[in-house]
Amino acid sequence: MNFREISIGEKITDSLSKRESKGYLVRVEANRKLTIDLRGPVGQDFDLYIKHNEEASAINWDFKRVTTKADETITIDPTSAGSYYILVYAYRGSGQFNLSTEVPTQDVEIVPSQHIKGILTASKEALYYFIKTKEGQKITLDLNGPLDADFDLYVRYGERPSNINYDFKSYSGSSKEKIVIDKAKRGSYFIMVYSYRGSGEFTLSALPLEEAETVELIISSKENLKKKYGLPNLTQIEAKLGDYIDALEAAGITAKLAYVDDAASLSPYGASPVAADSPDQIKELIDSLEGKLNPRYFLILGGHSIIPFFRLDNPAGFDGDTVVHSDSPYASRDSDHLIPERALGRLPDAGEGELPFFLSLLSAAASRVRRADRISFGMTASVWTDASQAVYVPIKNAGESLELSPPVRHGDLPAVRLNGKGYFYFNLHGGEDTANWYGQEGSSYPVAFTPDNIQNADVRNAVVCCEACYGANIVDKGVDEALSLKFLAKDAACFVGSTKIAYGPTEPPSTEADLLVLKFFERIKEGLSFGDAFMKAKQDFARECIAARARLDMTEKKTLIEFVLFADPSSKMEEA
Amino acid sequence: MALTEKELKKMVKGYMEDKSPELAEVEPVISEESYEIPEAVQRKLGVRMPKSTKTVKVLTYKKMVTAEDGAKLPIVTRVTVDEDGNIIKTTGN
């Protein structure tokens, strides 16, 4: 009997007469998961027999599937290296069928400008990759393989291509192939490098030829701003906002302002107003605007009373926090809110009578220049000294050391000790009803840092990260009631902190808040924008947790949702 | 988990007396947690993890302390114990 060779991922269509058999074979490597799927006509009865390295028959098989239908699936896991012979047999009836094989492997991501090397060891073998794309982006994929082989390139949006199902293909008879996607959709394109003939090493390159327009989506509530500050003051806010939008334009970023409750601001985008007190509705609106505007950055303008935080269930129950205030769902494209996919930050306002704070925040954002000295200031509760040393590493310069509390107290820190610092790191205690942060040694909790410490200090353009519990709790707080707001009032460029009880270890390795802040500092030092650094820090955090312990536990999940970024997400630190 | 809650508390109490004496006398809340990584998380991170059926016990010790200026601060320690009774993680604020 003739067994026709088919390739992994190939979907073939064939037909059987009554009591007829047809044979196929597929080659696989060892220790893979091979799925063979037969889809036959309704009301008929086709069977599947598989034999490794020998022709299969109804009496000679390693695997068989013989139900009373014509749809049969066999999964072989793990495979042995070699050929699997597949026999399709029409036990009852006749008709057309589809047969497909699949070996799922983890597809490798290729990013624009990257060159990936791979090896195909035999004819009919395939390797899979994917590339994430933005709406409208132009991508060129180049394949260069051996001169004596014939490798082909297939691309499909959203799922793996096969040599039958694809959106783009390039098969020239050599191993030099090229596919250009002129206007990509947002999402992932899956790529198959396929050996039609021969074997050898290849290079797959993705070149971005044309970037899509960089857009920042600004989300706020006109009604809430009007209600809180009054109509005349709204005019002032909008004037400052106009300056900020102009500054973005000058920096090559197109700003799109969306008042979530204002039909006039949403109609150009074909969207309708939503309830400004409903985080769920606001998220839905953001999801819809993203589809239309493809923003690179997302800025929430205003505090909890303007655009509310989500109130998420606390994953680490029993610690006293019933809910967690979070911006994470706004930063996610789906219902999973643990892993952000958007570079998102918030420029919060403060109390009703503190309009100047908000206006000043907008002015600072409009200045766009966030240049500060690379020198740093770090402070930790003494009990966490060892753990904090590990977090301090990326921003620490020669001669700098952490302040330990105790013995250091807030009164020991005059403005001159803080002036001109570009980076601030705090690992102290905090409470829900106090603006101060605290040290610890045994059962002693001295006041380590207060808003008064920066009242007269120059912390302009600084990057500030704080691991204190409630360090970024701004709900119903004024500028002097929250150190996070106080730093922003003093023109700090960025504040990262937790809205609720935050966790960390007493000694390295870094976990939870320590690990997240460490990753953020590392990303900032790479020169990323605040929004990108924060998004990637959370992704790094989750990857490291999973890589280290094959899990994300409840305090790690809480860390992911409770840490927020107060900054213009498209802005970045420039070291002087 | 072979250990009863009483045995768990007794076992971790010694550890707490050594590592977090200020919480050693606090009655912990014991909860069970599983380690499954949501499918969406795996997809977004580009990782594949086998489905885990492992569960652990978490002992949460919490109390409020008074800081030097009178502010109330929450102090929490969470001790994670695996199915074999090993302490595999301690974290706190």
Image (tube, helix red, strand yellow):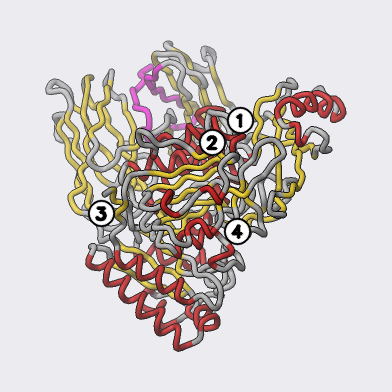
Chain letter for the residue marked with disc 2 in the picture: A
- State whether discs 3 and 1 lie on one chain: yes
* Residue annotated with mark 1: A67
- State whether discs 4 and 3 lie on one chain: yes
Q: Of the residues shown, which amino acid type is indicated by label 4?
A: Ala
Q: Of the residues shown, which amino acid type is indicated by label 2?
A: Asp
The boundaries of the magenta stretch are A1-29
A570 lies left or right of A68? left
Q: Spatial distance from mark 4 to mark 3, Cα to Cα?
A: 46 Å
* Residue annotated with mark 4: A435
Chain letter for the residue marked with disc 3 in the picture: A
* Residue annotated with mark 2: A71
Instruction: Establish if A246 lies above or below B93.
Output: below
Badge 2 vs badge 1, beta-carbon distance below 8 Å: yes
Q: Earlier in the sequence, mark 3 or mark 1?
A: 1
Q: How crowded is mark 1: few (under 14 residues within 10 Å), some or many (20 or more)?
A: few
Residue A358 makes an appearance in the image: yes
